[in-house]
Image: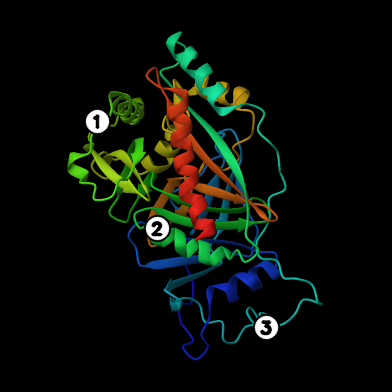
Amino acid sequence: MSIDVRVNREKKIQVDDLLERTLDLGGSFALWRHPSAKEKILMICNSGAVFQEETVLENSKSGFALSPFDPSGKKIFFNADLVFTFKGDEMINGPDLSNTKYISSTAEKTNGKEKLKYYQSKNNFTPTRDFKDLVNVCIDKINEGSFEKIVTSRFQDVDLPENFDLLKAFDRMCNQHPDAFVSLVSSPETGTWLGASPELLVSTDAQDKFRTIALAGTQRLQPSTNLKSVAWTQKEIEEQALVSRYIINCFKKIRVREYTEQGPRTIVAGSLLHLRTDYEVDMKEVNFPQLGSVMLKLLHPTSAVCGMPLEPSLHFLKKSEGYNREFYSGYLGPINFEGESKIFVNLRCMQLFDGKARIYAGAGVTADSVAEKENEEAELKINTLTKIIFS
């Protein structure tokens, strides 16, 4: 990544200065913080989004990928034209902008017009089906033998307060979800999405290690919870096992047999608990340098966000869910930053409209599901993000 990393210490550059100027120029940005990290990365793309049939990790330029839930949809790649690293409000790494006009207009007025705060989505549809009714249909289909599992979803629109500050919401998301991948992506092509994903889909690193996880099962985090003694129902255990088997079957398809498996274990994701199993492959050992891209295509969408078997579940959801998920339960993440690519499932996310936020959530339906409980699970997930807006 050929970026001048000199920092001008005399002029303190703020994230909001950079974003304001980027929006003035019609550019795009991605702001993120990796799980458990202290620094946040701001990537600016002024060269325009690139639409791709598939996301390729190997030998890619540095950038940021964003894919819709529907695997047949176009994937988007934003080139890393400018990259900054912040710790708190202090920029600790980035290009020297002291001799450029890039941020010179941040103090200027735009002909008396209100400055654009973020790109707003246009598609303001309403759902056409009751969520609990859909869950009951799924249960019937599973009992008939059509599916093993179906992951249904819903959304809730929330009016944004007049003083809503997107960057402050991002910081609150980081504080409340320390172990999640927290991201804020805004572009003319996608609108603006803010989320905190606990689910790694694919990662590759400079040591040629490939990683993915199986994440499923949800319950509320209670005060003073001892993670080692959390009890899970048979339904939740089986739901997580289905996701694990799906990953292992993907390995089998490409004849990868040398992998390590750790779990399942209970993990915290904000105010919720999940079951997680980790998988790792040494790509040098198996002589498979393209494993990241191949597994990304095989895994998306996983059974944790779609269902099993995959193709019938995907067809059923697109026909029966009553709305287009767009980028919810798709994937996103940085590609080829210092030899690492980390792609996450776009969960615990909201889409921003003019004065409104659309919050998405899903629930995995199996033969043991109860519609009321699945609705409660979706409500729990929605409430974790509603608190971010009104904190």
- Near mark 3 (Cα within 10 A), the count class, few <14, some 14-19 or many ≥20, is few
Instruction: Give me the residue at 46% from left, 82% from top.
Output: 6
Q: Which residue is mark 3?
A: 107
Instruction: Give me the residue at 34% from left, 25% from top.
Output: 242
Residue type for callout 3: Ala
Q: Which residue is mark 1?
A: 257
Farthest residue, direction left: 228
Mark 1 vs mark 3: in front = 3
- Near mark 1 (Cα within 10 A), the count class, few <14, some 14-19 or many ≥20, is few
In this view of the protein, can residue 281 be seen by the observer?
no
Mark nearer the N terminus (1 vs 3): 3
Residue type for callout 2: Gln
In this view of the protein, can residue 363 be seen by the observer?
yes
**Which element is circle 2 on?**
helix
On screen, residue 39 versus residue 282, left or right, reads: right
Residue type for callout 1: Arg
Q: Nearer the viewer, residue 364 or 200?
A: 364
What is the C-alpha distance between the residues marked 2 and 3? 32 Å
Farthest residue, direction right: 111
Q: Which residue is mark 2?
A: 176
Mark 2 vs mark 3: in front = 2
Farthest residue, direction top: 144
Q: Are marks 1 and 2 in contact (CB under 8 Å)?
A: no
Where in the figure is residue 354, as x and y percent of width and height? Answer: 70, 55
Q: With respect to residue 261, does 233 lie above or below?
A: above
What is the C-alpha distance between the residues marked 1 and 3? 58 Å
Mark nearer the N terminus (2 vs 3): 3
Q: With respect to residue 117, does 146 lie above or below?
A: above
Instruction: Give me the residue at 43% from left, 66% from top.
Output: 40
**Which element is circle 1 on?**
loop
Where in the figure is residue 113, as x and y percent of width and height? Answer: 79, 72
Q: With respect to residue 124, does 12 lie above or below?
A: below
